[in-house]
Image: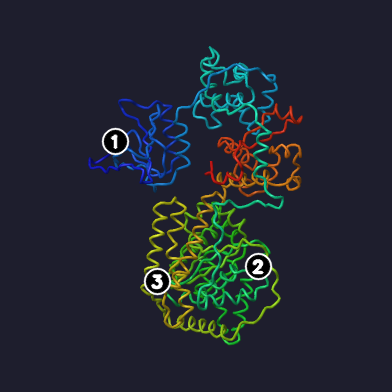
Amino acid sequence: MSTGLNVGFVLTEHDPYCIIDLDNKESDPATQEQADLHRRILDAFDSYTELSFSGRGYHVVVRGRVPVGVHSRDKVEVYSSGRYMLFTGDVIRNAPITDQQALLDRLFAEMQPAPTAQLEEREELLTDDAVIEMAMSAVNGEKFAALARGEWSDLGYPSQSEADFALLSMLAFYSPSDEQVRRIFRMTWLGQRPKATHNNKYLDRALSKIRAQLKVHEVNIEGLKAKAQQVAMPPEQKEAPRPEIPPPAPITFPPGLVGEVAQYILDNAVRPVPEVALAAALGLCAGVAGRSYNVSGTGLNQYIILLAKTGSGKEGAQFGIDSLVNAIRPTIPMVDQFIGPGMFASGQALIRVLDDHPCFVSLLGEFGLLLKQICDPRANSAQVMLRRVLLDLYLKSGANSTLRSSVYSDKEKNTKMVQAPSLTILGESTPQSFYDELAAQHIAEGLIPRFSIIEYTGHRPPRNEHQQPPSKELLDRFSRLVVVALTTMNNRATCNVQMTDSARDLLDRFDRVCDSHINAGNDIEVELWNRAHLKVLKLSALVAVGLNLDNPVIDEACASWAASFVHNEVNRVASRFASGDVGTGDSKQVYDLRRIIEFYFTCEFDRVAPYEVDERLFRKRLLPYSYLSRRTMNLSSFRNDRLGATNALKRTIQLLKESDLIAEVPVSQMNKLFGSRAIAFALTGMSPANWYRLPNP
């Protein structure tokens, strides 16, 4: 319990914090239903939590805002400003304060008094059997059937009252007649309670809220068609990325040897791509120099991911590196020790390679697949060990660093201690396979923030028929780097990279930029920007080495290039997470479905005809459920959902409906207009071009 000496905090508009106060005083105890609600809130909001002064309630601290403070009858209070909170220090969840804006929005909406509508009896359009059949065949038909059977607890409803409301909402959607809704509801298992059969009071109270939420009973198809046509794009328009994701910044090569190597690889690639050339140059130079030079106590090894579409020129990295290595091998045979294996079977295998060759670069193909394997919760012991070793090695290349030995019950797996191992990784993948497998856990574990992600999004470049061998000047400079690296390693020596005052000032300013992102960002941004300053430091030092092998000094030009490169790279990855264009889960599914719907409403019919779309629906600008099903069944975000692609699609459609982005066309209207009972949707009046300005539901 509290010691009597407490800390208070004033919530204002200028801080990022919000407090959820779950009250349960001894003089006014929470009911069982309220206590259950409090428990669900505690489970949902995974953030710092402590007991209140009574020892019975809770304070949950999160990042986020609510428009105004709210206080519900369920003894739940939420405030983000205008409140003074005393903390007890009786911690029950010692977790970081997390960003929970999406959950706060939902909690705030549920705590607001629901609007009500005056009930007006309207004519029945269909028979009871027809209404039931429509509800059973809808996207959420399985849920309707389960509620009708009384299986509400299996669906996660906290009490039958919430289940009653859900079933009444479904019936009210298909029937404008309140009397018909009451009659059908009373046919179900849920409708057998005395409070539902005694009189209409209980049902009418729910129906008045439901009718207020229903915008209109029928969809204005012609009006929506006109709105959709106003934003139609040319036939050649392809599915576009969300505008929130900034395009890759134009690639510039750094000064010195790194830039010269990149230029050679670009000029002699079969499909010249600057991003590929830069990734290869950084990987090769770091693979040679990573252990021989230090800056601020760390070596210069790099973790790099090169992303480009299949066939767009990624092979230029391997070709360029091989060309330079092959050219100097006759005079410096030991250059081969700086080129590592093309795959790692396990962490132990990687450590054994480093024991023999403590500094090298490995070119890893299909890195997205490797990432998926080693980060999968079901990863085997070898894959788990590899992930741990990759995490550890990034910071172990400094002269005074050591990768400790590992001992196992199986002696064959034991590894030796390795002094200053310098592993540089150049992994390649396609953007789709990499980002589809990327998830928040990969960021939180710290593996991805260690990588510099270089992405090429352009078209396949024209073939270059004019390959030339490297110039004598380039070979001389690269050979000397290899000789210096071999000599310093044999002598167990390192060279410390110095820094000019102007470069130090620039890196200090970049460090403050990182601080601002970390202090204001969510968990993803915190992890991404936490490594950014170190990445700039190591990159600028690598460029400085290429300028002067004997006395490398980071000047303002080196620091400026590295800071710009890292800032653009980290900002782009963070933007992908913010937009939902990453990984799996609800946010990725919503993003993918929005993209598919936007494409449907902004293209010509021949682009969607292969998906067996009824042209009559397309001309009326109605969206068939069958089209969405065919488009999503092979997307990893839906295919890999633990409940299956179909259930994931239904859940995502419901999210878009609840966000008032689409509306389901009643089956009666579909039958009347098209003689079809197929499920279809219409836009609710908002242009798809504006969807991407909205937050994810």
Q: Are marks 2 and 3 in contact (CB under 8 Å)?
A: no
Element under disc 1: loop
Circle nearer the N terminus (1, 2): 1
x and y percent of residue 150 in the render?
Answer: 58, 24
Three-letter amino acid code of the residue under disc 3: Ala
Q: Residues within 10 Å of mark 3 (few under 14, many from 20)?
A: some
Residue 183, above or below 583: above
Closer to the camera in the image, 667 or 446? 667
Q: Are marks 1 and 2 in contact (CB under 8 Å)?
A: no
Q: Nearer the viewer, mark 1 or mark 2?
A: 2
Dot 3 corresponds to which residue? 503
Give the CA distance from mark 2 to mark 3. 35 Å
Dot 2 corresponds to which residue? 313
Three-letter amino acid code of the residue under disc 1: Phe
Dot 1 corresponds to which residue? 53
Residue 430, above or below 358: above
Q: Nearer the viewer, mark 2 or mark 3?
A: 3
Which residue is at 38% across, 75% downward?
Answer: 500
Q: Which mark is residue 282?
A: none
x and y percent of residue 629 in the render?
Answer: 68, 42
Q: Nearer the viewer, mark 1 or mark 3?
A: 3
Give the CA distance from mark 1 to mark 2. 64 Å
Give the CA distance from mark 1 to mark 3. 52 Å
